[in-house]
């Protein structure tokens, strides 16, 4: 059976991370949603369904998958923002059946004719399939970025299942608590590091460097070739590949290729790629009146129903030294923040927010900086990426 992995019409609820990637390319623990789903279907052909504005970018990033095919076979349609497991995949049975969670489509089994008819009407980015039986299903459904943060423990516990035995014996110079729940994949861990897995597993992936006097408390994941500076505290967090991390990171997810090298607090937050936080940048994750935090999403204030919510920072964002970020702040991709006091809690993409004044980021300077930054990691800013960001800058130019 053909597998179709889709994002739906609520992709913008994952702002700002979903502005520059498909929802299924958002990190959930060690892997992205897409990587987790495709591991469940190793012998199936997979196609990806995304908004048209992302088609070329997703096709470049996932050249081994067909993106937005013109015609559809009989197949299984899978939401890219659900935490799928072998157990709940087995629950997806029946012909021309749509599976719902909280009145939102999470999966469907469709005939070729039904799928083609649905897609001609806009598909999952517009509507639910017609002429199907509706069934409710219980799954972990992520609707916003803070849902992913709240499921950090779930993601790390699930990731740890692929490691049968701890290799703690290979690191006798490292102090470990509950070592059977710690896995280190051929990384450099210096003396003086304390890894505490009492509250959840800790996974340190290949070729990471963890410097002395650092404290890592599970559940936690440290990605490939990530560097953790001395005297750093990491707790209940997911840090992607090729990051440089220092200071305090708690209950946060970092997509990858991001620098938070210096002291400063990052809590209950989600950061994209190629972010650079200046020295002393810190965020609030609790309001002084102890009320739930509201976040501006799609021009509306959404009540997170949570006391602890930090900030959400898109790709290629830069902050100056000493930047303070309020709870519930959204910073759009390709923005620069350098100001005294707190900046606004909602900053649009391509904003140049300096000294409480907001101008537009110069696109050519943005491209020049991106190329310089990525060159240091032996990565090229492709023509397709440049065109995508150019169109994004035009969209937000008049806002």
Image: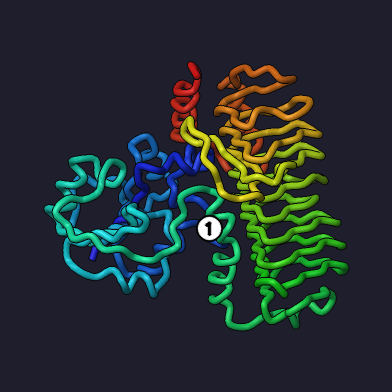
Give the image quarter of residue 38: bottom left
Crowd around label 1: few <14 · some 14–19 · many ≥20 (10 Å): many
Disc 1, SS: strand
Q: Residue at x 74, y 55 (%)?
A: 227
Relative to residue 179, is residue 135 drawn left or right? left
Disc tally is 1
Relative to residue 117, is residue 9 drawn left or right? right
Q: Residue at x 19, y 59 (%)?
A: 110
Front-most of residues 388 and 221: 221
Question: x, y percentage for residue 53?
Answer: 37, 34
Residue designated by label 1: 28
Front-most of residues 374 and 152: 152
Relative to residue 299, is residue 179 drawn left or right? right
| Residue 174 against residue 99 in the figure, above or below | below
| Residue 183 against residue 70 in the figure, above or below | below
Quarter of the picture holding the N terminus: bottom left
Q: Is residue 384 visible?
A: yes
Q: Residue at x 44, y 48 (%)?
A: 23
């Amino acid at each position: 059976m053909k597998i179709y992995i889709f994002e739906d019409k609520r992709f913008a609820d994952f702002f700002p991370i979903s502005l520059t990637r498909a929802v299924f390319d958002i990190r959930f623990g060690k892997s992205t949603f897409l990587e987790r789903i495709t591991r469940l279907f190793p012998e199936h052909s997979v196609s990806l369904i995304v908004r048209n504005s992302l088609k070329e970018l997703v096709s470049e990033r996932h050249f081994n998958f067909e993106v937005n095919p013109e015609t559809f076979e009989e197949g299984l349609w899978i939401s890219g923002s659900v935490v799928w497991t072998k157990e709940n995949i087995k629950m997806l049975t029946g012909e021309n059946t749509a599976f719902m969670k909280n009145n939102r489509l999470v999966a469907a089994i469709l005939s070729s004719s039904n799928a083609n008819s649905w897609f001609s009407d806009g598909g999952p980015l517009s509507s639910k399939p017609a002429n199907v039986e509706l069934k409710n299903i219980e799954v972990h459904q992520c609707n916003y970025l803070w849902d992913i943060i709240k499921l950090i423990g779930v993601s790390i516990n699930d990731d740890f299942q692929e490691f049968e035995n701890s290799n703690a014996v290979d690191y006798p110079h490292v102090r470990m608590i509950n070592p059977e729940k710690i896995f280190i994949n051929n990384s450099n861990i210096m003396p003086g590091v304390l890894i505490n897995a009492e509250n959840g597993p800790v996974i340190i992936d290949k070729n990471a460097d963890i410097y002395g006097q650092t404290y890592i408390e599970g559940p936690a994941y440290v990605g490939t070739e990530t560097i953790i500076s001395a005297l750093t505290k990491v707790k209940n967090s997911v840090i992607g590949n090729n990051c440089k991390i220092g200071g305090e990171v708690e209950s946060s997810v970092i997509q990858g290729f991001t620098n938070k090298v210096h002291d400063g607090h990052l809590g209950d937050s989600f950061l994209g790629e190629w972010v650079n936080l200046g020295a002393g940048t810190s965020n609030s994750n609790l309001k002084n009146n102890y009320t739930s935090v509201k976040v501006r999403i799609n021009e509306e204030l959404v009540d997170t129903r949570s006391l602890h919510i930090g900030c959400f920072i898109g790709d290629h964002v830069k902050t100056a030294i000493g930047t303070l970020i309020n709870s519930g702040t959204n910073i759009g991709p390709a923005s620069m923040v350098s100001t005294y006091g707190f900046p606004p809690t909602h900053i649009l993409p391509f904003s140049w927010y300096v000294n409480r004044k907001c101008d537009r980021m110069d696109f050519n300077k943005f491209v020049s900086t991106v190329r310089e930054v990525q060159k240091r990691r032996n990565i090229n800013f492709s023509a397709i990426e440049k065109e995508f960001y150019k169109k994004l800058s035009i969209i937000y130019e008049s806002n």
